Amino acid sequence: MVNQDAYCREVEYLIQYAHDDWLGFSVISGSVGSLLGRGASFQEQLTLLLRIVGDLYDAGARAGDLTESTREPFLPWQMEKAEALARIAAEVQPHSRLPDSGDVCWFTVP
């Protein structure tokens, strides 16, 4: 069970991070580990990861890909929250581990 106060603090930190910079999965995965502690199953970790990503979406952050373009360095995925969550889950599930930065996508507030 996740402490709600700690969860809110982590999500606020991640939202601010997404406002300031590209937010990679290593930071989000670190928050999941911090909140769940040792011994959590992969499914528990994935469930919390998707909850956090959903809250990031609700706060205006979007998933997307970094590019080499200086004009458009971030290309947000053109999909709604539910589609993005499904895509992330589908890409993470087969690996049975939480993603690192550079895996799947990045997040930012466009």
Image: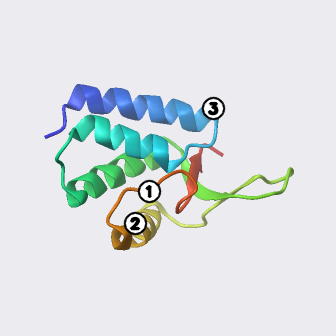
Left or right side of 24 for 55: left
Residue 59 sits above or below residue 3 on the image: below
Q: Which mark is residue 99?
A: 1
- The Cα–Cα distance between marks 3 and 1, rounded to whole angstroms, is 21 Å
Disc nearer the start of the sequence (3/1):
3
Q: Which residue is mark 3?
A: 20
Q: Which residue is mark 2?
A: 92
Determine crowd level at label 2: few under 14, some 14-19, many 20+ residues with C-alpha closer than 10 A.
Answer: some
Q: Nearer the viewer, mark 3 or mark 1?
A: 1
Residue 1, percent across and down? 13, 40
Q: Are marks 3 and 2 in contact (CB under 8 Å)?
A: no
Q: Nearer the viewer, mark 3 or mark 2?
A: 2
Rendered residue at 19%/31% (across/down): 3
| Amino acid type, residue under disc 3 in the picture | Asp
Determine crowd level at label 1: few under 14, some 14-19, many 20+ residues with C-alpha closer than 10 A.
Answer: many
| Amino acid type, residue under disc 1 in the picture | Pro
Q: Secondary structure at mark 3?
A: helix
Residue 68 sits above or below residue 89 on the image: above
Q: Secondary structure at mark 1?
A: loop
Left or right side of 54 for 17: right
